[in-house]
Each structure stands twice: as C-alpha cells, then as structure tokens.
Amino acid sequence: MALRRVYLDHSATTPVDRRVVEAMLPYLTEKFGNASSVHFFGQEARAAVDRARREVASMVSARPNEVVFLSGGTEANNLAIRGVAEASENYGRHIITSEIEHSSVRGICDALEKKGWKLTRLPVYDDGIVRIEDVRASVRPDTVLITVMLANNEIGTIQPIAEIGSLVRKEREKGNRHLRFHTDAVQAAGRMHVDVESLGCDMLSLSAHKLYAPKGTGALFLRRGVRLVAQNVGGHQERERRAGTESVAGIVAFGAAARIAGEELDERVAHVRALRNRFEAGVAARIEDVVFNGNRERRLPHLSNISFRYIEGEGLLINLDLQGVAVSTGSACSSGSLEPSPVIRAIGRDDELARGSIRFSFGKDNSVEDVDYVLEVLPRAVANLRRLSPLYQKATQARACESETV
Amino acid sequence: MPYSSIFKDHLANPRNVGELADASAVAEETNPVCGDRLRLSLRLRDGRIEAARFLAYGCAPTLACGSALAEMIEGMKIEEALRLTRQDIARALDGLPARKQHAAALAIETLQAAIKAEFRGQNSE
C-alpha cells in the first residue's frame, strides 16, 4: 500500500493552485512578450502585468502603482529596509525591529548594524508579541525606520501593527518627519485580512509562493511618496524601483493567486483553523509533556508550534517523514546553525524546549483525515524517541520516586 | 539534508535501546557545544562486550550514531572495540554529512570512556 503523504509545512511553501497554473501557462508559451517592448507581444505582457498589479494591490487595499513586483519576500525586505536606510541616512541611523523577525530581516539589520546603524530589537515576552509601550519608548529623534513583522513565521503570533502604525503617524505629526514603518506580511497574507490603510504601514512585503502561486515572485507595497534607494539598478522596470525584466508568468500567477485568496479568505481561514484546533486538542489529549508556543488567540489560524519535552526536533521530523508527514523544526541541527531557534528562545523557553519545537502548518487542501492520520503517527514517533532519551528516563525515574514516597 | 536510508532506519527503529541492569561499564558523555548526550551501558566479560545498550538526546545524527555503535559493538572483543574510529561509525550509516561528524566522534568518546571506566573499576577493587 502506498504511504499516505500529509503535507503540513504550508508556512515553508504551498502547492500551486490548478487555477493559478492555468492563468499563468499562456504567458510561458504564446504570450511570451517582454513587458517593456512596444510591439503587440510586449503590450500583451504589459496588460497582464498591470492586471496582476491591480489584483495584488486589491488584496491588501493598496493602489496599483504602490505595488513593486520583485523576486520574493527576501528581496522585498531587502528593498524596503536597505532602501529606506540608505535614503534617509542623513536624517538618522536608528532602526527599531523585533527579536523574532524572519531571518532575512534579521540578516539585513545585522548587516546595517555592522555598517554603523544603531539597532533596537524589541522583546516579545512569553506570548511572542511585541508591546506597543516598548515601541513607543524606543523611538528617538534619529529613528528612521521601524520594521516589525505582521505575523511570525515560526509561532504565528500576530503583532500590533495597526497600533504601531498609528504611533508612527503621531510621531510624524510631532515632527519626526522621516520615520518610516515597514512590515513583513509574507506569512500573514492569505491567512488573515491584510489592509495597508488600517495597518498604517509605509511598506509591506509579500511573497507569492505562500499563497498557492509559484516560487520566485513577490511584491513590496510602497506607499505613495515614500522614497527609497533602489537596490537593483540598470533598468526602467517597476518605475525605476526594481530593474530587471519582469517575470510575467510568475506575476500573472501571483495576481490570480491574490484574487482567489481574497475571494476565499474567510472559507480558508475557517477550514485551517478547524483543522489546527482539532489537531491541538488531539495532541493535548494524547501526548504528555508538550508545550504550545505563542499566544493561543493572537496567531495565524493555520499554524501550530509545539515543543515536545525530552527530545530534539530533527529526530522527530525524520520519524514523521518516514510515516509520510512533512513538518518543519526550528531546531539548530536541521537549520544548520548551532543555536536553537531564536524565536523559541525569545519567548523564554529553555534550550531543551527550543530544540524540541516543531511547526505544523495547515493548508486549504488538508483534510480532517490528514489530521487524524497525524494524530495516529505523532504519539508513536514521540514515544519512540523518548524511549531512547536519557532526559526522559531521568524524568520518569524521578516521577516514580516521587509517587513511591507519597 | 541527505541522510541515507540506513541512517533513517536507525532513527525509526533504534537498536539496543535502554540501560543494562547488570552493566559492568557505564559512561555518559556530552557534546559541550550543542548539548547532545550519549549514554552507553556495557556488560563486559572475558575480554568481550557481551551486551551494549544506549540512550541518546540530541540531533538526529547523535541518535543514529548511538544506535549504530551499540549494534556494532555487541559481541565484539574489547581490544577491537577500542580500535574503532568515527569513520567506522559513519560507514555503518552509509556516511554522515560533513557538519555532522561530531556525532560519530561523541559515539567513539563515549565508548572509550565506558571501557576505561570499567578498567578503573577493576583496578580499584
């Protein structure tokens, strides 16, 4: 019998929706033009890119000319943060960010710090959420950028972006004219309502492949009037904000995926939330010594991050993979670093819990049967690894001693 | 991460798991960098490793190396076991990624520490 495959890693990437594939295919074959060309083929491609721009803009309630297409979330974050830092360095070199940003934002901030920028990294406390009071207390006259993600990629916690947005507006009214606000919405888009007006951000990063479109395309929402220094130069594309021939088929796919995500948002949210909640209830009932990471209410509906005490995530990942279940871990071993997940550490968990954390992320095509299958194999995999853990043996011996003395 | 199928099998079906009640040699070593642990208990008799059991905590290579080691040394002459190198462990797993060689090193260290512990125990008697 073929092994059942259950994909629970939608925060890493999603399968491409069939409707999205159909929308993009003609732009790989007969409608192959370069959107910068003046002839028929070019204009056909241009029209498709413009339509996709309206579709992506509409998903986040932006204007079409505020959308810059590029290669993905990492490039969007680079353009936003480096672009603003370089454009405003005469006004100040202080940036506020959080301790739990995606590695791309973390990497960019670290690189700027090495070049002399001052960084404030806000704590997230044990629920994985930035506090607005901390943001307020960190703003200085030389602060030129605040960059805080809309929702975290490992634990899914939703940050107070609208509150930060209104704080930024007030700061600007008080005379801090050069303060800009960026949010990384790569994990959030398609999983919660995202509206740049109510968020009050100047820039917002998006990635197509988290929305059932192919990898290789993303977008930066760039509010009208916000100046930044282009990071890709040497071409007029995207109104000089991002040089390079547009990936027309990828952009068309992104547009279609954004439109469908908007239409189906409520349905998708209800579906993945029901699956995630069924899964978490099942884990709590079947497995001892687990810790659910991140605020249980203020988080993305499709994601569950759980630490399994006494064991390490990578071994569990491989055991689950052998049973056909695909998940991911922030454990140091599988990410190739020595430090356990900075996100799980930032919410105050010890090294053991940080190393034992697993992310389960559900998608629109998962079913109740998928959840029940995982609930069948997961307890066995955890027990299998605990059986050989010296930490577990010690803990169970200690418990046995306690119950004897009682 | 390209782990071999034998490697994965050790993770799904770890061999020689546990602790010997009548062990004559026990050692628990820790990798100070990442905190990985390997505990080995051996019953040594007449110059041979009559039985070997392991417990391990840490990343997947540490678990697989513990399992491969415990399986490999059961029945082995002590002098032969002392000649094992981390390459032998890696070979038993059809290779280890370059960054994971330390897991095989921890297995060899733990084996040598256990055997030394039993000789120290004999000398003090």
Image (cartoon, coloured by chain):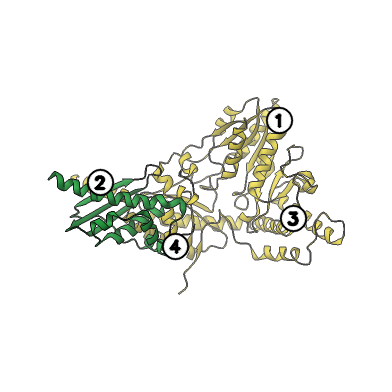
From the viewer's side, name the closer residue of A58 and A122. A122
Marks counted in the figure total 4
Give the Cα distance between marks 3 and 4.
Answer: 44 Å
- Camera-near label (3 vs 4) is 4
- Name the residue beneath numbered marker 2: A398
Mark closest to the chain's N terminus, 1 or 2: 1
- The secondary structure type at the circle numbered 1 is loop
Label 4 crowd (10 A; few <14 / some 14-19 / many >=20): few
Tag 3: residue type?
Ala
- Name the residue beneath numbered marker 1: A178
Tag 1: residue type?
His
Tag 4: residue type?
Ser
Q: Write down which chain is painted yellow.
A: A
- The secondary structure type at the circle numbered 2 is helix
Tag 2: residue type?
Ala
Rendered location of residue B53, percent (x, y): 26, 57
- The secondary structure type at the circle numbered 4 is loop
Label 2 crowd (10 A; few <14 / some 14-19 / many >=20): few
Give the Cα distance between marks 4 and 1.
Answer: 54 Å
Circles 4 and 1 on the same subunit: no
From the viewer's side, name the closer residue of A380 and A296. A380
Q: Is residue A180 left or right of residue A337?
A: right
- The secondary structure type at the circle numbered 3 is helix
Do callouts 3 and 4 mark residues in contact (Cβ within 8 Å)?
Answer: no
Q: Residue at x 15, y 48 (%)?
A: B122
